[in-house]
Image: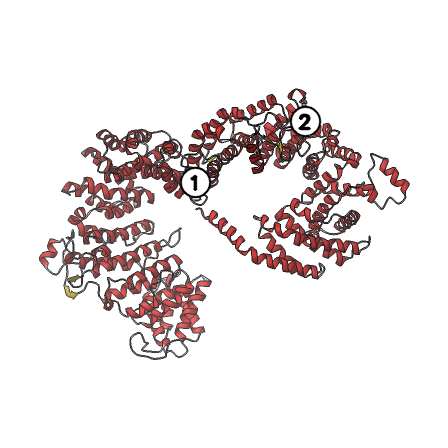
Amino acid sequence: MEPHEDEEDAVSIGLHRSFAQDTEVLESVVSAIVEAKGDADPAVFKKAQVIVEKYQEQGQLLEPLLEGIITPVMGLVRATVIEANGNKLGKSQLQVVKKLCTLIHTLMTVCSYKTVVKFFPHQAADLELAVGLLEQCEEEVIVGSILKEESTGEWETKCCLLLWLSILVLIPFDLASVDTSLADSRTADATLTADDEPPPLVQKMIKICTAHLENPGPTREMAGVLLSRLLTRPDMRGALRRFMAWTHDSLAAPLDGMTGVFLVPGVIMAIAAIFKVGGRDILLDVAPSAWEEASKLARSQAAIRSPLLRKLLVKLIQRIGNTYLPPRVASWRYMRGSRSLIQNLTAVSEDIHIDIVHSKDDKSVASGGLGSSGVDTEVSEDDIEIPEIMEEVIEILLAGLRDKDTVVRWSAAKGVGRVTGRLTLSFADDVVASVLDLFDPTEGDGAWHGGCLALAELTRRGLLLPERLPAVCPVIVKALHYDVRRGPHSVGSHVRDAAAYVCWAFVRAYSSTIMNPHFEVLAPALLTTACYDREVNCRRAAASAFQEGVGRQGDFLHGIDIVNAADYFSLGSRGNSYRTVGPFIAQFDEYRSHLIDDLISTKIRHWDRSLRELAAEALAALVKYDPEYFEATVLGILLPSTLSPELSLRHGAALAAAEVVRALHDCGHQLTPEREKAIAGSVPAIEKARLYRGKGGEIMRSAVSRLIEVTAKVRVRLSVKSQKTLHDSLDENLKHPNGDIQAAAVSALRPFFRSYLLPASDTTVARSTAKYVKLLKTDPNPSAKRGAALAFSALPGELLAPMWKDILDALCAATIPEERLEDQDAETRVNAVRGLTAVCEILYGGPAESLSRLKSPLSAPVPHKLLGPVIREQVMDVLLKALDDYAIDNRGDVGSWVREAAMDALKRCSFLLCLETNGEWTKVEPERSPGETEGSARVSELSPGEAEASGLNETSGFTTRSGPFFDEEIAVKVVGGLAKQAVEKIDRVRDVAGRTLQQLLHSDQLSIDRIPHRRALEQIVPDDTNLNWAAPGISFPRLVQFLKFPEYRPYLLSGVVISVGGLADSLGKISSQALFEFLQGLPPTGSGIGALTDSSSTWLGGQMLELLKNNRGVDRVIVPALKTLDILFCKGVFSHTRVSFYDISVKT
């Protein structure tokens, strides 16, 4: 599962777990607010807001608590207003109201205002009080500042009061009767009879709302809600006409100014809200003017620039269209049957078929007569007259389905569904045909997405008749695989997601009798999307639609088994979907061919390289179910596709062909001679077509290397010419500067040599081993040297043995940086270190871990008595010097790569040396030519005859020594070198060094007496894999204890001073504190193992003096060392020492 999906699931679980605690805290906070009568500390309100905001994504959890929160809080607001007795609130009272309304607004944000408003008080006497309070807030804004408004919660208070008024204006009395400004009855009667002049109280509300319509904040929406409830009252017809006249004047003004940008969406939002809640008899009077304004605005530049305005216009236009059409339930709609268990049982017992339709507000009613909402269900088709304006309305809605913004398309789709439900059958069929026209290949992704949304809405409302399904289902299958390349990426995930939504609507809307013929098309398409789609939301949407079908229809083959395997969590990870879920579903014959076809036709040619690689693996995982089909058909498609001019296709085909061939071999399937010939000729054909050149040549090289690797593993018969061609291809890939290509070539070389170049001959050695030695020594191309160093790790022992000493010499020399700075190449040194270790293990007969488990040693390519001394004296020396590689370039400390490789190499070579408990060797000190490096020192066996036979020339005197190869001398160097790296400044290097020390100290292959003070070191470096050695707070307090042992002091101190005196402030503090605490805890004198033999200041001063002498002129060490000395002097560490730093400080 992707990381962000894991985080979302964890957050969801955490919310549920903490909800009980949050509920208690929230109730106590509300109780405290009520007890304080709203005048509680602001921190109390903030605490409540923080708890509520936690549930932004799961507001439904708070709904059971809303009544207990909103009722007392709004009661405090009401009580505060009543207490003022018609006068303006005092400053302190107004602050209390603002704090209370801020809490209510937080609940509105999380749970939606529609849910919150249900718990507001709605006494008729509160209307004037709320209007008066809102007026006072408006006046305060005039004299206040913007910063004050934002910081004191004024707009939250306005939102809350506007919402409160939206429910108060629904009182079942004439608003003039509750307006106390109408003092005498004659004025009241006059107002009641005057149709065009609303009461003063209403005028105040309209004035406040129209002012807020040009506010870009949330008060604009609340003002629209209040206007919609107020102006659609039966006694407000005149006020509605006056408001529509005002909107006409507002929209007629220039729209380019700042006011127009905010005012126009507010006006349209208010009109749309009016047409949503108003009765048809009221709205028909103003519908023509509203249509005129909306249709004109829809073609304006303002609508083109604003997605919000287009969405609001689509909403308004669809509602205007519904106003012109009489409310009815279409008699021609598809009716599946009752959704009520009681009605179903009644129909069965009485042998009566009851059809259920859905009214305007989705309430189920029996067909015939009037529905529960008063919608006429028996209007004859001939009696319905469709206004001419409906053609323009539907045209605008269909254009909205093509809009570039999803919110507009979604609103248009719902509008199409609502309007079509009131049309006659012939008109509705034309609408469906127009929607299907959106799925033309020439249309953009927006049209496909809008078409899917519209089809889903039509299906949910029963307006897509079963007769249309044969034409719709193939279109939806295409939409499930919609993916169009756009530059370096593709578009179509939203289309595939919407197509899955359509399938979900199908299985919910239609009976199994109707859907059965279409399951054979939809089910495989859903499963291929669920298994192999790139996007997790599409995979889960398709699986959800399939699961819905299994649950509601029950006719999906193997549905229960598939639903259990392809669940929400298993499809969260793309790799798991491809490698596990897909192969599980492929075991069923009904779906296997569809999965294979989808991988071959779309996924191996996908624009995403990682998806092509995953598709190749997924294809190989299906081979076991039908090997004959894969050899005859799949390989017949893939191999010719490797020469395709389309880069993504030929790359994916090469990878897929390689994986399929490997899978066929793993299944024990024998390839036919014709197929082997085609596989053997694929790589030469790619080279002949020059497909390595130009764009995409790099990824083709990696794919070809993988194809050669598989060809060698399955031992495809190759001619001598083909072998040479493939070998040359791998050698060219070894010289490529891309590290991934070199690694792929090395992986292919291993089986290639074992399958085609053994037993070794002089020609083979010259073409491989000698060639790589020459490249490593003389080639000026750094990439060629890198590849040659890696290539030795792929050579079998038979090819390494004839030139083993030359190979080791060349690799050792390659680990030493060149004298010229511009010639230095860190990657070459890294590969040389890795290659040196691999060659030693191959010549020894294998890794030490595997050799130590053998009861009798295998015959090694080179005798251990010859190889062991070379590893001890030459290889180990080179690796220890690699620990001092601190080269830097524009990429930073590139020497750290070499040091990391050297640490692993030291561990592995130490294990090899420990296999020989006794040995005898000669240490040779050769004469060096002026250009010869120290790494080319020769080591020979004791016997001059054997030394001469092995190619070792002694040029000076030698000293013979006997004993184990891995003794205390080399153990101190290895452990000390690792300890030094474990206390330096780079976290990554410290982590590698710490883990390597753990493996070395706690290995069963090393005898206790070989590492000095091993028992004590094991306590310092415990065998705990959970220790984070990269964390300085963990590593430094432990590792500074190495200073107890004189053998390791020089190594550890040279690393510690780099951290203590370095530029990293936090690291310097931790490391210096660890060092100082260690020094404070030491006894002044002591004896025995691990104890200090002198005062801490004396030995420490001597070691620091030696460090400065040995690194004279090396600023990387001298500067941090001097800073460390300064810190130690300031701490008083050297207050009693007699060591003088004067001479060395002057010279450095």
Q: Which residue is at the far front?
A: 350
Give the colour scheme shown. secondary structure
Q: Position of residue 958 (x, y in %)?
A: 15, 63
Mark pair 1, 2: CA separation: 44 Å
Taking 765 as reference, is 405 left or right? right
SS at mark 2? loop
Frontmost residue, 698 versus 1102: 698
Residue 601 is situated, as x and y percent measured from the top left of the image, at 38, 31
Count neighbours of disc 2 (C-alpha within 10 A) and say few if under 14, some if 14 to 19, many if 20 or more: some
Q: Earlier in the sequence, mark 1 or mark 2?
A: 2
Residue 612 place in picture, x, y as percent: 38, 37
Say which of 289 and 307 sits in front: 289
Q: Is any part of residue 933 visible from this angle? A: no
Q: Label 2 sits on what residue type? A: Leu
Residue 1101: numbered disc: none
Quarter of the image where one finds residue 18 = bottom right
- Label placed on residue 563: 1
> In the image, which is nearer the foreground, mark 1 or mark 2?
1
The 10 Å Cα crowd at callout 1, few under 14, some 14 to 19, many 20 or more, is some
